[in-house]
Amino acid sequence: MVQPLDHQPETPSQTAGPYVHIGLMPTYAGNAGYYDQEIGVSPISDGAQGEVIEIVGSVYDGTGWALRDALIESWQADSAGKFPGQDGADPAVSGHCRFAADAVTGEFTLRTVKPGRVPSRYGRAFAPHISLWVVARGINIGLQTRIYFEDEDNEGDPLLSRIEQRPRVDTLIARKIGDGKYRFDIRLQGEGETVFLDI
Amino acid sequence: MTDLGPLIPRNREMHPEPYWPDYKTSVARSPNQPLLSLESGPSEETGPTFGHSRFGALDNNLILNWTKGAAPAVGERILMHGRVLDENNRAVPNTLVEIWQANAGGRYRHKKDTYLAPLDPNFGGCGRTLTDENGYYQFLTIRPGAYPWPNRGNDWRPMHIHISVFGHSFGQRLITQMYFEGDPLIPLCPIAATIRNRSQLDRLVAPLDMAHSRRLDFLAYKFDIVLRGRRQTMFENKLEGM
């Protein structure tokens, strides 16, 4: 026998299921009225500094069908690269948003400010990015990925540079489709599969 | 700011299989390619916080919150309670815990749920709370019913409550489900079976907790939740590779 470790494993995940919206986005699910203020309605409030942008996209399954029931959360730094809670962070940026694939079209929209570069523990900065966490029926553990931007300098980003198959880097880069507008699609499986993270 | 170190990497052996043919929807929704494993950075080690001011008195009372206290929900009254801890056995205080569930007949208040069991006009099925300074949380609710669902020929979900937890950083984000001690449907459920490690599945089964039940009122079930911890070494930022 050896001494026991003072450590216990993480609780296992289970799928969020088909009815996740009644729990996390009750107004969206048609059940308004529980709360005065819901969680993650917008990552920014009036007066947020920086460029306000809109990102649209869909979450596709392995057959190419856009999920109508995906729920996504985002987390990001402010336009200066500071996360909420850090010294000097923009008080108008909560950094966190919840949004859903539309029940009819499957398209989601995230309206936020473009984040700044974020320093890493080892000096090299991360290019501007937004972290995503995707859950839905049939997804047994939430999928983590990131949105980068095609009109930013992504050279040397510590995460993107670790992707061996260079064409797959494109799956993490939002395409500019207009002034302050970007498109970012997530492919869960198969051709063009998004790089998902274990981080 | 003190550097608490990176998050302890997830041990995916302890989590469900993403691809699990008996749970049919997972077949086209699970990645084929391996995940890209990296050490966490600021994007994963920071996370949203939610102030007490936004929470209402009935937010964690699902028996009353749909009607704002006008009439109680139908069902077996239960207290669901426990602690949120991290892998280092430290309490996770002031963190958001959200739950959602079916009513006592096994029906969700959702447009897409067309099960025969009726909606309860006095039950919504959604609640939230913050853990206290010791990581403790509690919800007053009713025990949800089991229900059939379209998957294989005749699949039924065991009684369960969905739980979403934040922790203090975005990399700790977790959604899971709480099952109930003694439910004979647990071993038959293809969603529960996505967790191949039997002792891990047992950690999702809440025991009946008579010591916390209240006479002539409610039964209690205890459910602790463990989130990822941080590596926390006193040598952080000193020696590369330490």
Image (cartoon, rainbow, N blue to C red):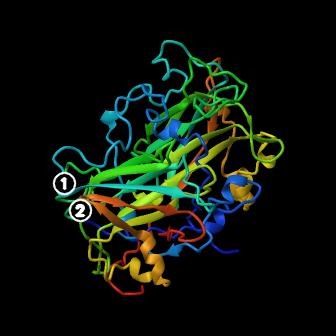
According to the image, label 2 marks what residue? A82
Camera-nearest residue between B155 and A148: A148
> Image quadrant of residue B169?
bottom left
Image location of residue A73, percent across then percent down: 43, 52
Question: What whole-number distance in Å separates the C-alpha atoms at marks 2 and 1?
Answer: 8 Å
Disc 2: host chain: A
According to the image, label 1 marks what residue? A90
Camera-nearest residue between A171 and B184: A171
Camera-nearest residue between A12 and B120: B120
Q: Earlier in the sequence, mark 2 or mark 1?
A: 2
Find numbered disc 2 in the image and state the secondary structure of the residue it sits on.
loop
Camera-nearest residue between A19 and A119: A19
Q: Are marks 2 and 1 in contact (CB under 8 Å)?
A: yes
For label 2, the crowd category at 10 Å Cα-Cα, with few meaning under 14, some 14 to 19 and many 20 or more, is many
Find numbered disc 1 in the image and state the secondary structure of the residue it sits on.
loop
* Badge 2 amino acid: Lys
Query: What residue do we see at 61% from left, 51% from top?
Result: A15
Question: Count of labels shown?
Answer: 2
**In the image, farthest residue toward the bottom:** B240
Disc 1: host chain: A
